[in-house]
Image (cartoon, rainbow, N blue to C red):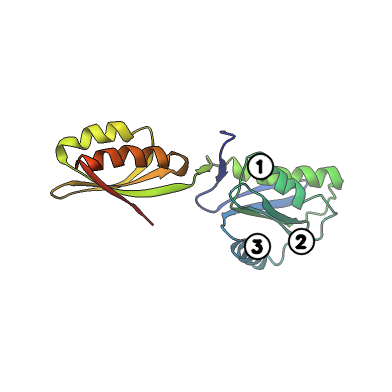
């Protein structure tokens, strides 16, 4: 894990664990606003309204600096906080979690609850590789056929991906560049544009 980045998931994921007859189902969802997080929490809670508890936590913001959690009736500090801790330990943001508990008749105690809620989220995080979140700039580049290979070699280390390429009288690339590299790429492309080998523009 690169400490310079934050991570999230691409698609909703769910896992279930059973501890001393209690069933804990964790659902994780990618969210980008408090409204989205609350809508997700509300939806999962309604889908599981017969459950004993629907505890939740979310983290938002470029640096994961907006977060909130709830024990939803469990003893204070035994559910929401361990859920939040599990996500923060993986440097996650733009993420919401709901752990639905169906009580099985055996009390777990404070330590048992903390471990169970934390483990439930941890298992779901580790189900699949996380997605690295980057701030990206999209650029449209038109380049002559003769110069295309040379340009791509020059740009290779700065591109996060080539989104698509079309071939007309020129080669047209839609590319994604990490924001921190944009000034360097802009200088490089501007130099070639002045020599009429390339034209380029930022696109939304």
Q: Residues within 10 Å of mark 3 (few under 14, many from 20)?
A: many
Q: Which of marks 2 and 3 is nearer the N terminus?
A: 3
Assess whether mark 3 and mark 1 are in contact (beta carbons under 8 angstroms): no
Residue 36 position within the rendered picture, expressed as x and y whole percent measured from the top left? 59, 63
Looking at the picture, does residue 46 appear above or below residue 150? below
Residue identified by numbered label 2: 52
Question: Which quadrant would residue 76 be assigned to in this image?
Answer: bottom right
Q: Which residue is drawn at 56% across and 57% down?
A: 32
- What's the CA distance linking mark 1 and mark 2? 21 Å
Disc number at residue 41?
Answer: 3
Please report whichever mark, 1 or 3, sits nearer to the chain's N-terminal start: 3
Q: In this image, 66 relative to 150: left or right?
A: right
- Along the viewing direction, whichever of 149 and 2 lies nearer the viewer: 149
Question: Which dot marks residue 89?
Answer: none
Q: What element carries label 2?
A: loop
Marks 1 and 2 in Cβ contact (< 8 Å): no
Q: Using the numbered discs, state the Cα–Cα distance from disc 1 to disc 3 in whole angstroms.
A: 18 Å
The picture places residue 44, in percent across and down from the top left corner, at: 63, 63
Q: Disc 2 to disc 3, how far (Cα)?
A: 15 Å
User: Between tags 1 and 2, which lies in front?
Assistant: 1
Residue beneath the point at 30% across and 40% down: 189
Quadrant housing residue 197: top left
Q: Which of marks 1 and 2 is nearer the N terminus?
A: 2
| Residue 127 sits above or below residue 56 on the image | above
Q: In which quarter of the image is the N terminus?
A: top right
Given this view, does label 2 or label 3 mark the residue nearer the observer? Answer: 3
Quadrant, the C terminus: bottom left
Give the SS element for disc 3: helix
Judging by the rendered image, the residue that carries numbered circle 1 is 122
């Amino acid at each position: 894990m690169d400490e310079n980045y934050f991570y999230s998931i691409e698609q909703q994921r769910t896992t279930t664990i059973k501890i001393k007859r209690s069933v804990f189902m964790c659902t994780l969802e990618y969210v980008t606003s408090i409204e989205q997080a609350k809508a997700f929490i509300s939806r999962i809670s309604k889908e599981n309204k017969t459950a004993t508890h629907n505890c939740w936590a979310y983290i938002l913001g470029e640096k994961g600096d907006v977060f909130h959690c709830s024990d939803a009736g469990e003893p204070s500090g035994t559910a929401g906080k361990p859920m939040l801790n599990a996500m923060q330990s993986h440097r996650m943001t733009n993420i919401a979690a709901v752990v639905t508990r169906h009580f099985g008749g055996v009390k777990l105690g404070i330590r048992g609850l903390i471990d169970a809620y934390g483990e439930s989220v941890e298992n779901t995080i580790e189900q699949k590789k996380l997605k690295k979140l980057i701030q990206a700039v999209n650029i449209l580049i038109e380049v002559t056929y003769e110069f295309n290979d040379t340009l791509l070699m020059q740009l290779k280390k700065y591109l996060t991906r080539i989104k698509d390429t079309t071939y007309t009288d020129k080669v047209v690339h839609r590319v994604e560049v990490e924001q921190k590299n944009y000034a360097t790429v802009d200088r490089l492309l501007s130099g070639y544009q002045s020599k009429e080998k390339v034209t380029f523009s930022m696109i939304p």
